């Protein structure tokens, strides 16, 4: 029997969620058709397609897509499917298609924007319905595409909120990241770390806002780092790896006081007061370059804000320092692709790029001293949720009935409202277009 709107909404209660949100293949199939279609998804970064004809391949909600730079400098997101037989126009991760697309199967060709250009044996289609059919319309482009400070997002459904209404105040996190460049430009460099984890995507996304787990889950990593660093003078400069790993061992009080903020539609910012990134060593020549570009007051405002994680629900998590993002790509109810990207900050010293690369390798690589803890826990939880003893997942910590009014709200850093907010948005966009 098909799930109804009422069935789905009943799975998300005020202070807990049902395990089916993590384990049900039926729900995941519905997410593909409803939730991911009704919400804005991160596609890629404009620096990945600098020249006309450059493209970047991506799959979102089982939809194979191509982000491609147009001849006029714009960016379009096309369906990676020949209108003839369905052959992908490119099977490469990225590249340059030249001035047009050419299908490798029957040589149908399309303009850079996906509209039809030519096809062999043209006479054979005269008098047929092909020109008026879907096959005659071209590759097809995603209509709702937004490029915000070179971050490219798309939405499949024509209904639902527009880009700025959907993201609202959390866009300040991208502003802070981009404004860290004296020229206002970032470039994706250093490759992308990819890790397929056998867990539900929502499990990974809520963990981004979980500040209680580091003390126990990452205890071995922080203990090892503390042993290596013990006895050093307080004023001795820390190696970059130590600078980045030691704060994971901060106590519960530290993480609680860092504070958080929830926004409508599931978005959040963790570490609005300070974070594990706040203590990074200063770089005087970089600060001087920022001051020359932005002025002293604006530079101080940019650098003093180093949120731990800003979640652009449901597909992107941003770290303005150390200039890194994570992209969440759901593959199945129990399988998620997580990508860690590094940015080179234009006009900044190489140290900042090194910091971004080091952090991603240290914390998000599947071979890191941190990520293997998380991966083991996520995959174990996915198995544990098969138990019939308790069908519910607790999100009770710091629940306050007034939060049900919604809106933007400041909270303490260990408050599970940061997670409850995500699930309430999930329930809304899962059912907004259901009968």
Image (cartoon, rainbow, N blue to C red):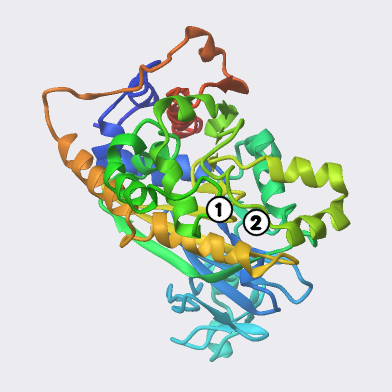
Secondary structure beneath dot 1 equals strand
Residue linked to disc 1: 42
Which is nearer the eye, 261 or 336?
Answer: 261
Q: Looking at the image, which residue is at 47% across and 75% down?
A: 93
The reply to whether dot 1 and dot 2 touch (C-beta < 8 Å) is: yes
In-image side of 393 versus 419 (left or right)? left
- Numbered tag placed on residue 22 in the rendering: none
> Residue 153 location in percent, x, y?
61, 53
Residue linked to disc 2: 151
> Residue 266 location in percent, x, y?
52, 32
Residue 282 seen in the figure: yes
Q: Considering only vertical position in the picture, is 31 above or below 191?
A: above
In-image side of 74 versus 406 (left or right)? right
Q: Looking at the image, which residue is at 45% across and 58% down?
A: 241
N-terminal-most mark, 1 or 2 = 1
In-image side of 184 versus 407 (left or right)? right
Quadrant in the picture for the N terminus? top left
> Residue 408 location in percent, x, y?
62, 23
Calculate the distance from the C-alpha at mark 1 to the C-alpha at mark 2.
8 Å
Q: Quadrant of residue 27?
A: top left
Quadrant in the picture for the C terminus? top left
- Crowdedness near tag 2: few (<14), some (14–19) or many (≥20) residues, C-alpha within 10 Å: some
């Amino acid at each position: 029997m098909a799930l109804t709107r009422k069935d789905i909404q009943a799975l998300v209660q005020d202070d807990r969620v049902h395990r089916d949100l993590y384990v049900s293949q039926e729900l995941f199939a519905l997410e593909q058709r409803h939730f991911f279609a009704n919400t804005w998804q991160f596609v890629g970064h404009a620096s990945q397609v600098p020249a006309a004809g450059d493209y970047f391949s991506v799959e979102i909600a089982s939809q194979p897509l191509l982000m491609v730079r147009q001849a006029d400098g714009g960016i379009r997101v096309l369906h990676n499917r020949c209108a003839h037989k369905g052959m992908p126009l490119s099977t490469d991760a990225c590249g340059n298609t030249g001035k047009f697309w050419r299908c490798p199967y029957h040589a149908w060709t399309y303009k850079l924007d996906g509209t039809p250009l030519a096809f062999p044996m043209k006479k054979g289609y005269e008098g047929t319905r092909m020109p008026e059919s879907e096959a005659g319309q071209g590759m097809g482009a995603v209509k709702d595409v937004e490029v915000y400070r070179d971050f490219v997002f798309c939405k499949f459904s024509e209904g639902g909120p527009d880009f700025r209404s959907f993201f609202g105040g959390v866009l300040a996190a991208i502003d802070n990241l981009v404004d860290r460049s004296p020229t206002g430009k970032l470039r994706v460099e250093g490759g992308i770390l990819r890790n397929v984890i056998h867990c539900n995507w929502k499990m990974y996304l809520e963990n981004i806002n979980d500040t209680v787990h580091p003390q126990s889950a990452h205890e071995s990593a922080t203990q090892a780092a503390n042993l290596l660093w013990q006895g050093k003078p307080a004023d001795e400069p820390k190696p970059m790896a130590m600078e980045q790993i030691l704060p994971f061992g901060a106590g519960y009080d530290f993480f609680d006081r860092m504070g958080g903020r929830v926004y409508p539609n599931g978005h959040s910012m963790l570490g609005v007061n300070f974070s594990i990134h706040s203590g990074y060593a200063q770089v005087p020549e970089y600060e001087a370059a920022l001051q020359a570009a932005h002025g002293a007051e604006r530079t101080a405002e940019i650098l003093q804000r180093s949120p731990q994680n800003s979640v652009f629900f449901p597909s992107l998590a941003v770290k303005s320092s150390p200039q890194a993002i994570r992209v969440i790509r759901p593959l199945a109810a129990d399988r998620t692709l997580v990508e860690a990207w590094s940015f080179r900050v234009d006009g900044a010293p190489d140290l900042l790029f090194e910091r971004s690369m080091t952090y991603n390798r240290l914390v998000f690589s599947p071979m890191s001293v941190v990520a293997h803890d998380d991966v083991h826990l996520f995959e174990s939880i996915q198995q544990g949720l098969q138990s019939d003893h308790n069908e519910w997942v607790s999100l009770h910590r710091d629940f306050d009935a007034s939060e049900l009014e919604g809106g933007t709200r400041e909270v303490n850093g260990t408050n599970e409202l940061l997670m409850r907010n995500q699930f309430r948005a999930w329930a809304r966009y899962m059912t907004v277009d259901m009968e």
